[in-house]
Amino acid sequence: MRSVHHCVILLISFFLVSCTTVLDNLPGVYKIPIQQGNIVDQAMIDQIRPQMTERQVLYILGSPMMVDTFHQKRWDYLYSNQPSGEDRQQKRISLFFDDNSLVSGIQGDFKPSSTPITKTSEETTVDIPKRDIEKTMWQKIKGLFGFDDIDDAPRKDPDAKPADTGTQIKQTL
């Protein structure tokens, strides 16, 4: 009886361990494509030319995935993609610099094309006409509260006649 009990426990443990393979192969289950590293494609590599500065390469490819402390002049870009649980696809490229300029040595899964490729820009430039601003924003805000051009100090009108302050006080009392 004990041997049957042990066999049942052994069979159940095998089924539990194999559940991951069964669950991974279910039809209709969505699996997230996992991308890791710098996304590098052939169009990006075609823009790279010898004697480019490090800054220009950073603009095109982004920062390198790995910079070796022993080889500071070598930049490695790694990209791996595993779409929907399929086999992993991995791409690698290594760039070599000398005195802040790219040496012609490029190693990896991509090879630059021999003809220069220029990337067309989808950006557009819009010319905005100059505005004739009558009032500043602060003046407009003050105008909303009825303080149009009113300062703390009283203004003197050049056409006004001087008033006798003594008579005004007597009249108000």
Image: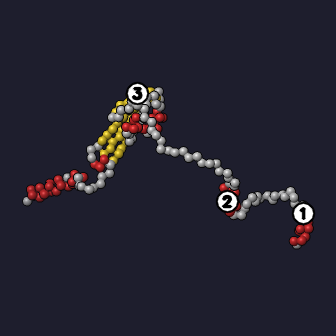
Q: Residue at x 36, y 44 (%)?
A: 36
Say which residue appears at 88% left-offset and 72% top-offset: 173
Front disc: 3 or 1: 3
The picture places residue 34, in percent across and down from the top left corner, at 33, 47
Q: Which residue is mark 1?
A: 163
Q: Amino acid at mark 1?
A: Ala
Q: Residues within 10 Å of mark 2 (few under 14, many from 20)?
A: few
Q: Earlier in the sequence, mark 1 or mark 2?
A: 2
Q: Is residue 95 above or below residue 26?
A: above
Q: Are marks 3 and 1 in contact (CB under 8 Å)?
A: no
The residue that disc 3 covers is 104
In x, y percent, where is residue 158?
86, 56
Give the alpha-carbon distance from disc 1 to disc 2, as whole Å. Answer: 34 Å
Tell me the element at label 1: loop
Q: Is residue 53 above or below residue 16?
A: above
Question: Which of pointers 3 and 1 lies earlier in the amino acid sequence?
Answer: 3
